[in-house]
Image (cartoon, rainbow, N blue to C red):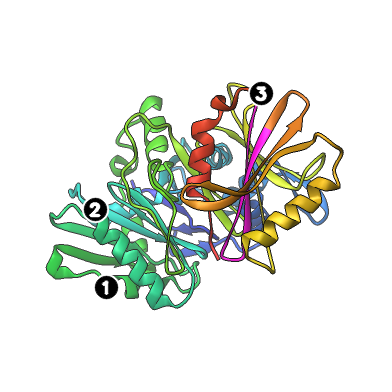
Amino acid sequence: MRVHLIEISPTAIRRLCCGGATVAETEVEQAAFENIDNPVALVDLRPVSVESLWHDIFESLDCATTEPVTVVHPSWWSPPRIDVVRAAARVLPGDAEIRSRRWLLTRAFPGSSATSTVEITDGFVVVTGKTMTVEARQGRVEAVAEAVALSIQAAASGTAETVLIDAPATVRGAKTLAAAIAQRLPSSGGIAAIVVDDIRLRKLAGELKPTDAKPHRPKRAKASARSLWALTVVATATGVFLSVGTHARHGAPRAPGSFPTALVVEGHVALEVPAHWLMRRVVAGPGSARVQLTSPADPEVALHVTQSRVALPGLDATAEFLKNAMDAAPPGVFVDFNPAGRSAGRPVVTYREVRAGHDIRWTVWVDNAVRISIGCQSRRRRDDAVDRECQLAIRSARALN
């Protein structure tokens, strides 16, 4: 008996079994990826549930077998995204196993506890080892490769280290970037780099056995694994955003007792947020269109994220724009305006938005010609209810391109 593998890369879904790679390249697939964080998508101007889109994709990739199926997803995906995949995968035969991409990559070098993995997406590069980091894909390939290599070396323990660099054909330029990263990792320093291209990936898929795919069946173990690999790759909980050239650098270990977090990529911005908060896009009502993440414990506790390209990147221009918008609003809606604040080591604009039942403390700055706004919502005079989640989001948020 063999395992049938369905691979979800950051931008495509493939079946890596049954005689070769089969890619689901349809409008449905595109809508499924673009709306995975939403309950409903528009396909041919019709509202369709996102879960049904993923259901249809898996159904089209089913190779009519009763043998076990494993679905591999990007390691940095949040638990809500993985839950969408898990629900849709019920159409597959048996009890499909849902695994992280890191789990599959490490099959290439079993038995090592010091293995790091590198996952390349269209907009950024994820490095997962003892810590998790991300580097934006900005500028020349050589510059990005250098930044990734420096992150890997900074996190290396000094002992022999194996680095598995993922290079899926479905991600633009991944093969070239993977080779450039491998070239910059010094073998003399005890770091061995292995590029996992499509040929090696299909070989891994063909070698999987049911005992590999399902070593632990208890639900508690599955949930634990999901939490482990869904932890953020944007920044560590104690890290501070630093600009090194055109790249974001993060490398401090996660603080003991910190809460599970996940990566959110919204437009040109990535940031770290609580893993189990409910995410939705808000396009109606007061305020700008935004992503809202709400605490499951209190509907009045939330984070708001907006982002937009700006022609004038200076903070003075941002402060003037915000002040003009506030002056046009009814009196008392926007208060405590500070055009010269500081947060996470960077100059920011801050203000408070007063709404019925809650306040939203806004922190705004410009990174690489992208205006980033983080709103921290809590009940009146209860800022402490969202303080640690707020600081996490502000520290980790940055522009990807």
The image quadrant that residue 181 belongs to is bottom left
The Cα–Cα distance between marks 2 and 3, rounded to whole angstroms, is 44 Å
Asked whether, in this view, residue 272 is left or right of residue 50, the answer is left
Q: Main secondary structure of the magenta part?
A: strand
Tags 2 and 3 in contact by the CB under 8 Å rule?
no
* Amino acid tagged 2: Thr
Q: Residues within 10 Å of mark 1 (few under 14, many from 20)?
A: some
Viewer-side residue, 382 vs 166: 382
The Cα–Cα distance between marks 1 and 2, rounded to whole angstroms, is 17 Å
Viewer-side residue, 328 vs 80: 328
Q: Would you say residue 58 is visible in this rendering?
A: yes
The Cα–Cα distance between marks 3 and 1, rounded to whole angstroms, is 50 Å
Element type at mark 3: loop
In this picture, which residue range is highlighted in magenta?
360-380
For image coordinates 74% across by 52% down, the residue present is 322
Viewer-side residue, 320 vs 286: 320
Element type at mark 2: strand
User: Mark 3 sits on what residue?
Assistant: 379
Tags 3 and 1 in contact by the CB under 8 Å rule?
no
Viewer-side residue, 343 vs 272: 343
**Between disc 2 and disc 3, whose residue precedes?**
2
User: Mark 1 sits on what residue?
Assistant: 184
* Amino acid tagged 1: Arg
Between circles 2 and 3, the one closer to the viewer is 3
